[in-house]
Image (cartoon, helix red, strand yellow):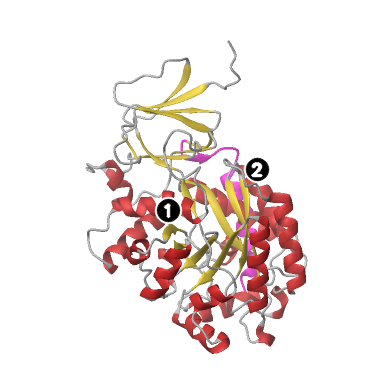
Amino acid sequence: MNDGKGRALWIRHSLAALVPDGVDARGGLLVRDGVIEAVIGAGETPAEPHDVFDASRHVVLPGLINTHHHFYQTLTRAHPAAINRELFDWLKALYPLWARLTPDHLRIATRLALTELMLSGVTCASDHHYVFPDGLDEAMDIQAGEAAALGMRIVLNRGSMNLSVRDGGLPPDSVVQDADTILADCERVIGRHHDPAPGAMTQVALAPCSPFSVTRELMAETAALAGRCGCALHTHLAETFDENAFCEATYGCRPVDYLEETGWLTDRTWLAHGIHFNDEEMARLGRAGVGVCHCPTSNMVLASGQCRTRELEAAGVAVGLGVDGSASNDSSNLMEGVRHALMIGRLTYDASLTHLDALRWATEGSARCLGRSDIGTIAPGRQADLALFTLDELRFSGAHDPLAALVLCGAHRADRVMIAGRWTVEDGAPVGVDVAALRYAHGQAARAFMHG
């Protein structure tokens, strides 16, 4: 009898799986119609007919969730104009180069970043795009199309900047837009791309770039629009001491006060970096339900500081992970970011911060930042988004705890990735992607940004 359900897949007998405490997943997982139907205990066998994938060589994780990135920056990695600089000087060096961005540049940069992320085990990516030179009006549509072609879940962050150098901000005039244009396009992008339903492949967040690149009025109007449309809000905040000083000099308050005054202290908001909050500010963020995306790699590259992850979580703040822009990382590898989060966490605190904390930030914590309860955890009813890693490389030889080995021994490439029940990476290769051709096309595009 046909009950309308598709055929199930039994992912059988993994080396280990990252599952909630007390759950026995030694028998594997049963996936059907894009959803995890059951977690199988040791010695159990699904009753009905099903296909089988033998995962006996694999460590199974919930798909990693990248909650902060700038895909276009893959075109200016390790750029001689910007290396060895801190944030403000780094931005001043790169803004004029980013003003050259065209639709074709963004298309190939997005394709490469998504592919690179997927190969590291990412199944959902949030990209913060805020550079809009002339001719790039359809940036969000380009990114949505690239994600759909690869089968990647995406949160399109319709970013914005309307405070340029002539207004006392950092960006050049050529990459900013006026507030009316920004808000009109925000509404258009929400109407075209935002899917609020569980299992959504594409969602939209509204994301003014930072306090030093948008006006107070645009911050407030963006928050009001997001509230009317049921969208999330995202921005950079408290990344550097310079940013805090800018807020105090320009607005007469610290960044969290500025958030509150502009209507951003809401459980629909998550912030990138969140390094330089004091104890009282962290308590306020926790009470409001705000999340923070920890970006350990870029924070170290730009010498921005150390995110107080433990205090944030104690205050009730959801902590997720992000690779950040690929000109401040300089890769799009979230599994590498998990390891960096552990290492800088140990340096900040002590050895009681574990690999399980870092993995939790990249999965469950990141899902909370995005306001999603359908991804980030291996459990019945959750989306079948999975990252499977092998321990076959020399770096893993002699490792005894499979989950710890992924982080401590430096796993960086998934062998298999599943998104919404469909394999998007098989045997370490992205399905349907000519990696050599992609590398060549992206390298050619990057030549346009070679010289200042």
What's the amino acid at mark 2?
A: Ala
Image: magenta residue range: 427-452
Residue corresponding to mark 1: 365
358 vs 429, nearest the viewer: 358
Which residue is labeled 2 in the image?
149
Rounded to the nearest angstrom, the CA distance separating label 1 from label 2 is 27 Å
Q: Who comes first in sequence, dot 1 or dot 2?
A: 2
In percent of width and height, residue 8 lies at 50, 23
Vertical relation: 302 (above or below) 42: below
In screen coordinates, is 292 left or right of 230?
left
| Mark 1, secondary structure of its residue | helix
Q: Position of residue 362 (x, y in %)?
A: 42, 52
110 versus 212 height, above or below: above
Q: Is residue 374 above or below residue 191?
A: above
| Tag 1 near tag 2, CB within 8 Å | no
Residue kind at label 1, given as amino acid type: Gly
Residue 231 in which image quadrant: bottom right
Residue 391 to residue 174: above or below: above
Q: Residue at x 73, y 66 (%)?
A: 183
Q: Is residue 81 visible?
A: no
Q: Which-is-in-front pick, marks 1 and 2?
A: 1
